[in-house]
Image (cartoon, coloured by chain):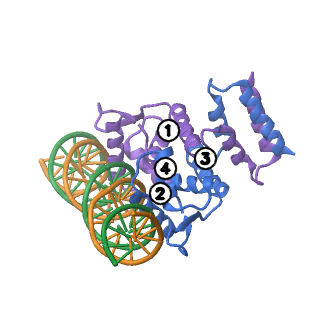
Chain colours: A blue, B purple, C green, D orange
Amino acid sequence: MEPTKSELEILQVLWKHGPSTVRFVNDTLNEEKRAVQYSSTLKLMQIMAEKGLVTRDESSMKHVYSPAEEEGKTKKQLLDRFVDSMYNGSASSLVMQLFGGKNTSKEELEEIKRLLDKLDQ
Amino acid sequence: MEPTKSELEILQVLWKHGPSTVRFVNDTLNEEKRAVQYSSTLKLMQIMAEKGLVTRDESSMKHVYSPAEEEGKTKKQLLDRFVDSMYNGSASSLVMQLFGGKNTSKEELEEIKRLLDKLDQ
DNA sequence: TTATTCGTACGAAAGTTTTCCTACCTTTGG
DNA sequence: CCAAAGGTAGGAAAACTTTCGTACGAATAA
């Protein structure tokens, strides 16, 4: 299923830091993103567990939540959806949009091409 | 302001076909996307006019709606936001995600590199 | 032991987005 | 002229997302 905006923020924390408690996720969100109450984060993570976006280990009193899907898999899925809805499925259109502006340096373009070369082998 | 998902669908129709009536947009959505009532599309487009996402010409009885912003400008904005929230602002991460999978052909990669070369000049 | 702290669960409510019913006006075809 | 078709406006409601107060049990420290 599709994570919402807030759910995605929580997933990012889990992907970055590994299996975590609600307390940890909430603290991280408050540091890195925005003020939010513990009970709000808890609620959201409970909903995510119901939806199957995360799993949770209830063996200890402090439940430990883990992402249900790999970061790459979920992100690729969201990216593909984005490309479909915005660029009619054309990845190269997206790339042009991304680098077509004036604010892309020669160096950055070279870097990208180098990365693409690696893929090519 | 940020278009919502449905609003974006409407903008896409307007960008693709130029200034249009509600009737035309609604028909197009029903053909290309999903079943939706005329009055729903109307309402949405009225809201978009209020928000300033579209302008409308009321001189005729059939109001004609136009996108307020250029397609490229809006899309670049949304794309940048996407890169920020998903890839921590790293465009090359996104590109890797996009082409990193097994399902990218050599030809497609070459095509992309050719396009990047053009930008480089 | 007992008060405090920390955890979960639940429900309500607020905010946002989407949908559509209905009233009412204008245009059009017969 | 009159009925039918097609247009806008507005409000209500449904659906979805987000927030948080509160109850209550478990752990902890004094």
Based on the displayed image, in which of its 4 quarters is residue C26 positioned? top left
The circle drawn on residue B83 is: none
Distance from disc 3 to disc 1, alpha carbons, whole Å, reads: 20 Å
> Amino acid type of disc 3?
Val
Mark whose residue sits in front, 1 or 4: 4
Tell which of C20 and A29 is nearer to you.
Answer: A29
Q: Chain of mark 3?
A: A
Query: Where residue B91 sits in the image (x, y, percent)?
Result: 65, 38
Q: Chain of mark 4?
A: A
Distance from disc 2 to disc 3, alpha carbons, whole Å, reads: 19 Å
Count of labels in the image: 4
Q: Are marks 1 and 4 on the same chain?
A: no
Q: Is residue B3 visible?
A: yes
Distance from disc 4 to disc 2, alpha carbons, whole Å, reads: 37 Å
Query: Where residue B59 sits in the image (x, y, percent)?
Result: 29, 30
Q: Are marks 4 and 3 on the same chain?
A: yes
Q: Quadrant of the C terminus of chain A?
A: top right
Residue underneath mark 3: A83
Relative side of B56 to A32, left or right: left
Residue B61 to residue C29: above or below: above
Q: Is residue B63 visible?
A: no
Q: Residues within 10 Å of mark 1 (few under 14, many from 20)?
A: few
Residue underneath mark 1: B17
Q: Are marks 1 and 2 on the same chain?
A: yes
> Amino acid type of disc 1?
His
Q: Quadrant of the N terminus of chain A?
A: bottom right
> Amino acid type of disc 2?
Arg
The secondary structure type at the circle numbered 4 is: helix
Residue underneath mark 4: A29
Tell which of A53 and A88 is nearer to you.
Answer: A53
Relative side of A112 to A14, left or right: right
The circle drawn on residue B34 is: 2
